[in-house]
Amino acid sequence: MDLAETGARLEIQQQLANYANGVDHSDWELYKSVFTPNADIDYTESIPLRGTPDDIVKVFNPIFETTPWAQHYITNFSYDFVGPDRVNVKAMFYNPTQLLNVDGVSHFYGYYDHVFVKTPQGWKSEHLVEHPLWQVNAPAGFGKPGADKVRPGAS
């Protein structure tokens, strides 16, 4: 691993931390700073939502204004450098959240697939797909059918 790749990995990890902090603190400028302006953000495996960063913020802002708290953990980074200016990144997420009108904490687990590109402003995600794997205490109709389990494979 050379110095440029090491730097890219660190910058991308910071962008993923910015993503988590942006959502958890409803800092939508920070959230949008992770992405290229016309990035394709796809949450359709969890909720019917896909669009640009501005599109997503229009939907997320009123939801997170009424969310008592949320905490995203993004870990286990995997990088596939497909050129000097393009990296496919897979990262696991765990998101405990206190949702309005839901007793107890809801837990969401899965991974993000990002395509990061090097821009004049640094590394930015131009494509994100969220892949939920399992959840606990999720609201009805949220996520993948049958995913509300104590652990993957539990009955």
Image: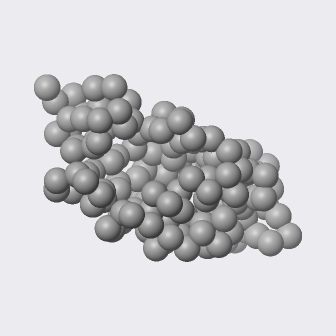
The residue lying at 39 percent from left, 36 percent from top is 143
> In this rendering, would 128 be left or right of 139?
right
Q: Is residue 14 above or below residue 131?
A: below
Name which quarter of the figure residue 53 lies in.
Answer: bottom right
Residue 130, given in percent of the width and then of the height, sits at 51, 43
Residue 117, given in percent of the width and then of the height, sits at 76, 56
- Is residue 127 visible in the rendered structure shown here? no
Name which quarter of the figure residue 74 lies in.
Answer: bottom left
> In this rendering, would 98 be left or right of 114?
left
Figure disc tally: 0
The residue lying at 55 percent from left, 73 percent from top is 27
State the quadrant of the C terminus. top left
Residue 55, given in percent of the width and then of the height, sits at 67, 52
State the quadrant of the N terminus. bottom right
The residue lying at 70 percent from left, 57 percent from top is 54
> In this rendering, would 65 be left or right of 121?
left
Q: Is residue 39 above or below residue 25?
A: above
Residue toward you, 146 or 14? 146
- Is residue 104 visible in the rendered structure shown here? yes
Residue 152, given in percent of the width and then of the height, sits at 24, 34
Residue toward you, 39 or 124? 39
Residue toward you, 123 or 40? 40
What colour-coding does the image apply?
one colour
- Tell which residue pokes out farthest to the right in this image: 120
